[in-house]
Image: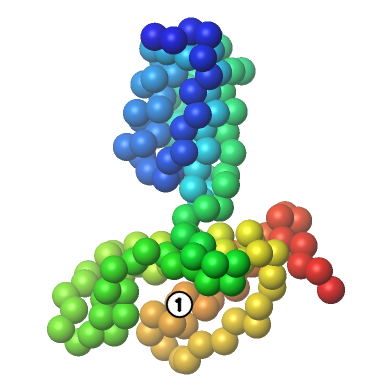
Amino acid sequence: QIPDAPAVYFIQPTEENLRLVANDCKQDLYSQYYINFSYPITRPLLEILAQELVAIPNVSNIKIMDQFLNFVALEPDFFTLQLQNSYQTLHSPQSVVSDQQMEAYISTIVSGLSSVLLQLQVLPLVVSVQGGAAQMVAEQVGTRLLDFLRERQLEPSA
């Protein structure tokens, strides 16, 4: 226990990570808690975190922020999502990936691309081939960009 020190967490918003952070908060290990997510937390996960923290008396000492940083910038205009064998996973006929795994993989790609675009504050024209993973990624990125515009998180220069 370090009661005079703040804790800074930089985590992916997963149920396991949320429960670990909530456990630290319940034990009152630190004076302040700054929880930073590498990408936006979903509503169901936010509700799990809220349920875990509702009984904590010093809940006002907890700050939660989305950072949109689930990519690696190698240069100002060059980045990677650090996904191993992504092309093979998405396109190989020998790839044995369940629909649920494919959806999770596409969600990871969409989240990473959305984070890059938000950090660069650019609004690209999103085009893809019809059908398959490319179309799913394009549609989901387009939806996220519209959400960012509505929420005024994305304000590209003219």
Figure check: 72 above or below 127: above
User: Which element is circle 1 on?
Assistant: helix
Tell me the quarter of the picture where residue 149 sits. bottom right
Q: Is there any visible trace of residue 59 in the rendered image? A: no
Q: Is residue 129 left or right of residue 115?
A: left
Residue 7: percent from the left, percent from the top? 49, 23
- Up-down: is 111 above or below 28? below
Image position of 96 with respect to 11: above or below: below
The one of 121 and 153 positioned closer to us in this rendering: 121
* Label 1 sits on residue: 136
Q: Quadrant of the N terminus?
A: top left
Residue located at (56% from left, 60% from top)? 115
Asked if one can make out residue 31 in the rendered structure from this viewpoint, the answer is yes
**Position of 78 compared to 87: left or right?**
right
Q: Quadrant of residue 101?
A: bottom left
Residue found at x 45% / y 77%: 136
Query: In front here: 97 or 3?
Result: 3
Looking at the rendered structure, the kind of residue marked 1 is Met
Q: Residue at the location (52% across, 23% down)?
A: 33
Q: Looking at the rendering, in which quadrant would you find the C terminus? A: bottom right
Q: Position of residue 20 (x, y in %)?
A: 34, 28
Judging depth in this view, the residue of 7 and 26 nearest the camera is 7
- Image coloring type: rainbow
Tell me where residue 85 appears, x and y as whole percent: 27, 74
How would you rate the neighbour count of disc 1 (Cα within 10 Å): few for under 14, some for 14-19, many for 20 or more? Answer: some
